[in-house]
Image (tube, rainbow, N blue to C red):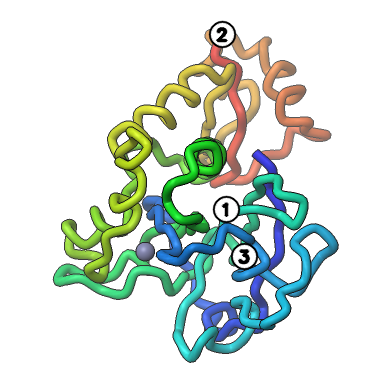
Amino acid sequence: MNLRRLILTNNACYKAGRTITPRGIMLHSTGANNPWLRRYVGPDDGLLGVNRHNNHWNQERPGGRSVCVHAFIGRLADGSIATYQTLPWNHRGWHCGRGVRGSGNDTHISVEICEDNLAGAVYFRRVYNEAVELCVYLCGQFGLTEVDIISHSEGHRLGIASNHADVMHWFPRHGKSMDSFRADVRKVVAESDYEIYTVAKGDSLWKIAAARLGSGARHPEISELNALSSGTLVAGQKLKIPKK
Ligand SMILES: [Zn+2]
């Protein structure tokens, strides 16, 4: 994953300044043939390239719309694939409208994949894999699993999003679905050599090592994996725990 950060601080959504506790991830795709990140993310940081129409989303209301997402996946100016984080992950985004049961804006981190003409197999594979890696990362950060990942269209069926088809107008053209996406996330998580533990009140490294690794004396393994300089832990802190 090539994860970069350019927060859309001029967007009214960012300025609204509301936060959420992320309970899931919602996958979107842009619905327009424009795989270049600079269409949505700007100004140019030297990698994105210049958006000559200056219509990226780092403005109050892009195209007059109240929209903002947490991340975009697409092409840099050199053609390579990257992810740009465009809102703090726990910021309340404006990405899915509402459904009959409420709004995923209150619960979900939004990931927007830039579409090409929907036919490019190589482009699809690359952005799909980038999205899998990003979701693995976010699941680790927020204690989520693959079952917490939905598409905008699934969000609509669950009653928490507007009636859009993304990403299911695209993925099946390349032999993928949300089920295969979730399975791929699950597979990558299973292959990683650590899992994420959220520190609880009263935890110590010794206690965690005793509970998770079978011996408190193994606590230096946790310190090392997380590059901890002291043993001080804070409730809510995420720690990588070796799987073996
Ligand atoms: Zn969408």
Residue 137 horizontal side relative to residue 185, left or right:
right
Ligand 1 is in which quadrant of the figure?
bottom left
The reply to whether the C-beta atoms of the residues labelled 3 and 1 are less than 8 Å apart is no
Residue behind mark 2: 244
* Label 2 or label 3, whichever comes before in sequence order: 3
Residue behind mark 1: 73
Give the distance between the C-alpha atoms of the residues marked 2 and 3, in whole angstroms: 35 Å
The reply to whether the C-beta atoms of the residues labelled 2 and 3 are less than 8 Å apart is no
Total numbered badges shown on the rendered structure: 3
Quadrant into which the N terminus falls: top right
Crowdedness of circle 3 by 10 Å Cα count: few (<14), some, many (20+)? many
Image quarter of residue 165? bottom left
Give the distance between the C-alpha atoms of the residues marked 2 and 1, in whole angstroms: 33 Å
Residue 186 horizontal side relative to residue 43, left or right:
left
Choose between 74 and 91: the one closer to the eye: 74
Foreground disc of the pair 2, 3: 3
Q: What residue type is labelled 3?
A: Thr
Residue behind mark 3: 86
The residue under the point 41% across, 28% down is: 184
Kindly state the secondary structure of the residue where label 3 is placed.
loop
Q: What residue type is labelled 2?
A: Lys
Residue 171 vertical position relative to residue 76 in the rendered view, above or below: above
Mark number displayed over residue 91: none
Image quarter of residue 229? top right
Residue 86 vertical position relative to residue 84 in the rendered view, above or below: below
Q: Is the residue marked 1 within 8 Å of ligand 1, measured from its CB? A: no
Kindly state the secondary structure of the residue where label 1 is placed.
strand
Quadrant into which the C terminus falls: top right
Choose between 171 and 57: the one closer to the eye: 171
The residue under the point 16% across, 58% down is: 157
Kindly state the secondary structure of the residue where label 2 is placed.
loop
The residue under the point 25% across, 71% down is: 162
